[in-house]
Image (cartoon, helix red, strand yellow):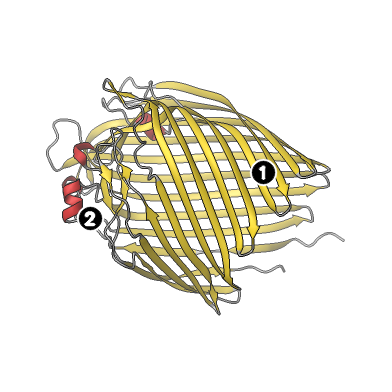
């Protein structure tokens, strides 16, 4: 008898979020929907379809503040952001279709995806001269992206061999104009089509011998950039390719597991990083290169009487690190730092307080420094990489009491620098920031789950993030004070029949 075709599972979470914003000119509205369906076509084959939709009609950008402004009145916006009505609106749709097939010793996975994105982004950055105070630079972007990933795995007893291919392409139509209060006007300042294609081939082998597991892999990537400049002479092409590899060894020691790994990585600049040129030229940045890194990691994971502990240490050396060297009114410009080193340790613990209630704790200590970085004749070797706190810690309790789900969180962050020269310092979070979320656990196929959330319960004033290398000392972005939100999520679950 032929197998009965049937939907195994479907869900449809949707939500709408509106936020007036903690600071002046920081209101946002977000609309999201996600749909998923898994369909068993054959006993060995499942088809998975997913769709995601996002629409942000507006997201006002208050910009970064100076140290004086942040200390005196952290709720204000940067003057030019308010004057020029800086912000953005985004619409995005994404679709994917997947196939999972498992037959005997062979497993195959195939994924196809399609993405469209439309961005309207009036910046606080000034337009080219002549530039009256109320005029800024307007960025428009229409993107079409497609991709295919396919891999197959052969099981050889306890061993595995995997090989696959990644194919991706994107086409961006990018325009720049002047704008006044968010409304574009005047002739086009930039009009170019940016086409990116990527081919990736990869293979991985896993060998198991008793308590030992050894895994090694290799990947070859070739990324091509092609710009067609409709206004000037900026048309051109660039190609970036590299071979990356990884190897790891894992040992099971009773209930505990230890591991060590080494890997190399290759990361190209994004189209935005290549398109934003400080001299205002169109086309591709010809001097911004990909960054390459080598990483080492060791770690241990083990159950203990009260729960589980895990610890890891790592060291990453990066050559030609892609670094934002200047930011003006929401537009960042990038360069390659000579060499950076990031090393750190992380520890995590999980304890069961009672059935259904778990306490969590994590701490990460990071030392990220420039090893060789020459800026305007000044050597910045030994300076801290901006935007990375040395220490981040988090404590939490999660669990359920009856049909009420609880998630309490307390976070700490230490001092971080906001510029490469380490001139501007954002203070740490002191006693930390506390948040609490309560959610009703629904039952049945039509799942309505109301929730309420309170963030920064004790209303502490902290710098939540920094704008790296912002001009005129505008680098500090205050975090919101006490913030209360509520709503409900809805999920529709499909059955087996």
Indicate the quadrant containing the N terminus: top left, top right, bottom left or bottom right. Answer: bottom right
Residue 488 visible (yes or no) = yes
Image x and y of residue 224, in percent: 50, 26
Which corner quadrant of the image does residue 377 belong to?
top left
Q: Residue at x 35, y 49 (%)?
A: 414
Residue depth check, mark 1 versus mark 2: number of the one nearer the observer: 2
Q: Quick one: SS at disc 2?
A: loop
Q: Quick one: SS at disc 1?
A: strand
Count of all numbered marks drawn on residues in the image:
2
Closest to the observer, 413 or 478: 413
Residue reaching furthest right? 1
Q: Is residue 161 above or below residue 41?
A: above
Residue under label 1:
110
Q: Is residue 178 left or right of residue 233?
A: left
Image x and y of residue 38, in percent: 66, 58
Q: Residue at x 54, y 68 (%)?
A: 491
Image x and y of residue 162, in percent: 72, 37
Q: Residue at x 49, y 71 (%)?
A: 406
Q: How would you rate the neighbour count of disc 1 (Cα within 10 Å): few for under 14, some for 14-19, many for 20 or more?
A: some
Q: Is residue 351 left or right of residue 58?
A: right
Residue reaching furthest bottom? 402
Image x and y of residue 229, in percent: 36, 25
Residue 192 visible (yes or no) = no
Q: Is residue 4 left or right of residue 435?
A: right
């Amino acid at each position: 008898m032929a197998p009965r075709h049937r939907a195994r599972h479907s869900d449809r979470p949707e939500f709408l979020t509106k936020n007036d914003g903690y600071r002046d000119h920081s209101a946002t509205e977000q609309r999201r929907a996600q749909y998923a369906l898994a369909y068993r076509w054959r006993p060995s084959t499942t088809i998975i379809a997913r769709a995601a939709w996002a629409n942000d009609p507006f997201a006002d950008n208050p910009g970064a503040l100076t140290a004086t402004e942040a200390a005196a009145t952290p709720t204000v916006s940067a003057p030019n952001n308010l004057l020029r009505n800086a912000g953005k609106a985004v619409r995005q749709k994404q679709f994917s279709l997947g196939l999972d097939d498992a037959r005997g010793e062979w497993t195959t996975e195939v994924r196809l995806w399609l993405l469209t994105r439309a961005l309207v982004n009036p910046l606080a950055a000034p337009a080219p001269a002549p530039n009256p105070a109320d005029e800024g630079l307007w960025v428009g972007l229409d993107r079409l992206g497609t991709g295919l990933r396919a891999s197959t795995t052969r099981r050889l007893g306890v061993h595995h061999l995997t090989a696959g291919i990644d194919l991706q392409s994107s086409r961006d139509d990018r325009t720049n104009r002047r704008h006044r209060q968010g409304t574009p006007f005047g002739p086009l300042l930039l009009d170019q089509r940016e086409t990116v294609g990527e081919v990736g081939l990869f293979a991985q082998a896993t060998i198991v011998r008793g308590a030992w597991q050894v895994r090694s892999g290799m990947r070859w990537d070739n990324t091509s950039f092609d710009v067609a400049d409709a206004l000037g002479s900026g048309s051109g092409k660039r190609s970036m390719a590299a071979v990356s590899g990884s190897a790891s060894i894992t040992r099971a020691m009773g209930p505990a597991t230890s591991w060590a790994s080494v890997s190399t990585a290759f990361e190209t600049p994004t189209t935005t990083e290549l398109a934003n040129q400080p001299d205002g030229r169109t086309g591709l940045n010809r001097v911004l290169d990909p960054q390459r890194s080598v990483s080492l990691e060791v770690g241990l994971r083990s159950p203990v009487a009260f729960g589980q502990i895990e610890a890891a240490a790592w060291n990453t050396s990066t050559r030609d690190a892609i670094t934002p060297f200047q930011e003006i009114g929401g537009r960042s410009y990038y360069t390659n730092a000579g060499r950076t080193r990031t090393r750190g340790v992380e520890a995590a613990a999980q304890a069961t307080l009672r059935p259904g209630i778990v306490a969590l704790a994590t701490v990460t200590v990071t030392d990220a420094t420039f090893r060789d970085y020459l800026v305007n004749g000044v050597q910045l070797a030994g300076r801290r990489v901006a935007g990375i706190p040395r220490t981040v810690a988090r404590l939490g309790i999660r669990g359920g009491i009856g049909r009420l789900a609880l998630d309490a969180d307390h976070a700490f962050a230490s001092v971080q620098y906001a510029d490469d020269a380490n001139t501007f310092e954002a203070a740490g979070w002191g006693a930390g920031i506390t948040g609490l979320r309560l959610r009703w656990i629904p039952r049945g196929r039509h799942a309505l789950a109301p929730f309420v959330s309170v963030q920064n319960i004790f209303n502490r004033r902290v710098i939540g993030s920094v704008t790296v290398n912002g001009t005129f000392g505008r680098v500090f972005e205050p975090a919101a004070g006490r913030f209360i939100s509520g709503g409900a999520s809805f999920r529709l679950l499909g059955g087996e029949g």
